[in-house]
Amino acid sequence: MKLSLRQLHLFCAITEHGSTTSAATAVALSQSAVSAALNELESALATRLFDRVGKRLVLNDNGRALLPQAKRLLEGAQQIEAGFAHPDASLPTRLRVGCSTTIGNHVLPHILGGLHHSAPRLRVDVDMGNSAAVAAKVANFEIDMGLIEGPCHLPEVEAHPWLVDELVIVCGRRHPLADQRDTRLGDLQNAQWLLREPGSGTREVVEQLLLRHLHQLSDTCQIGSSEAITATLVQGIGVSCLSRWVVADKLASGELCTLDGILPALTRRFFLIRHRDKFVSASLQRFWASCSEFSASTG
């Protein structure tokens, strides 16, 4: 066999750091050893994997095709090593999970709480961002799986429908619409809407659902988190459409109120996502199953 895991490991290091010099520093080898490993790999595959741009190495189409396969093989090797290093550990690995902010702040803690009791040796590192950012990290093998608030449009990522989430139209108790008995479609069309940023799963789904009924939103303001939107609503500014997970506490305290009866019930799907070529370890399988069990328990 011409290929070695060492060559693939150093190839991945070069793609991450952009040069053989920086990669050598990261993996504690000499620059000449890293360059030699790259030359051996390119010779074995009979192709160039990088374009040389000044002092930087930039993946070409061959390198981009190799990268996910290399990462999959290296992850498989790490799983083998971990399994033999801890033969009595049922869940020896550390997972990297990405989630959008609504899920990370309001749903994921319940799942982690269950895992803490059923799998106390499992460690989960959580990377939070909007749905588009999480999906991109799954596609690049930067995280093991993702939990997102809207559909995923990347062909290398498989998405599995998960929780059904209820969306509610809300405003602050001090907003004029809070005390208006007969709120109409025109009131919503002309209201100031507080929306998440483009790339947010909430933003994408809310726009699709609202525009289906309202056709236009004449006044919008972009705010980068659902929690910041909620805090602004409490001040009597604007209206928004948010997950009930996000506003449940404020509704219970009376600081926010729902504008019911104007539009039909609004729902969306949360999704579990992972790369189509992802190596599914026992730990990843366990976490995925815990997410599915949580969905069944709340359904």
Image: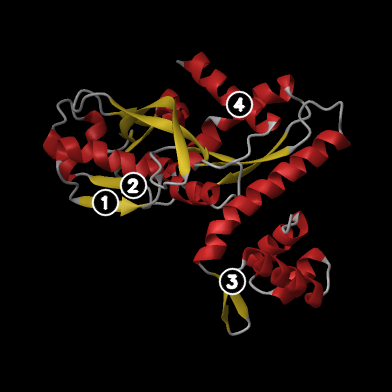
Left or right, 270 with reference to 146: left
Q: Position of residue 261 (x, y in %)?
A: 20, 23
Quadrant in which residue 4 is drawn: bottom right
**Callout 2: SS:** strand
Left or right, 134 with reference to 290: left
- Crowding at dot 4, Cα within 10 Å, few <14 / some 14-19 / many 20+, comes out as some
Q: Marks 2/1: CA distance? A: 7 Å
Q: The disc labelled 4 sits on which kind of residue? A: Ile
Q: The disc labelled 2 sits on which kind of residue? A: Leu
Per the image, the residue denoted by label 1 is 220
Per the image, the residue denoted by label 3 is 48
Q: Mark 3 vs mark 2: which is more N-terminal?
A: 3
Q: Are marks 1 and 4 in contact (CB under 8 Å)?
A: no
Q: The disc labelled 1 sits on which kind of residue? A: Thr
Q: Nearer the viewer, mark 2 or mark 4?
A: 4
Quadrant in which residue 180 is drawn: top left
**Which residue is found at the position 64% from the left and 47% from the top?**
72
Q: Mark 2 vs mark 4: which is more N-terminal?
A: 4
Left or right, 283 with reference to 109: right
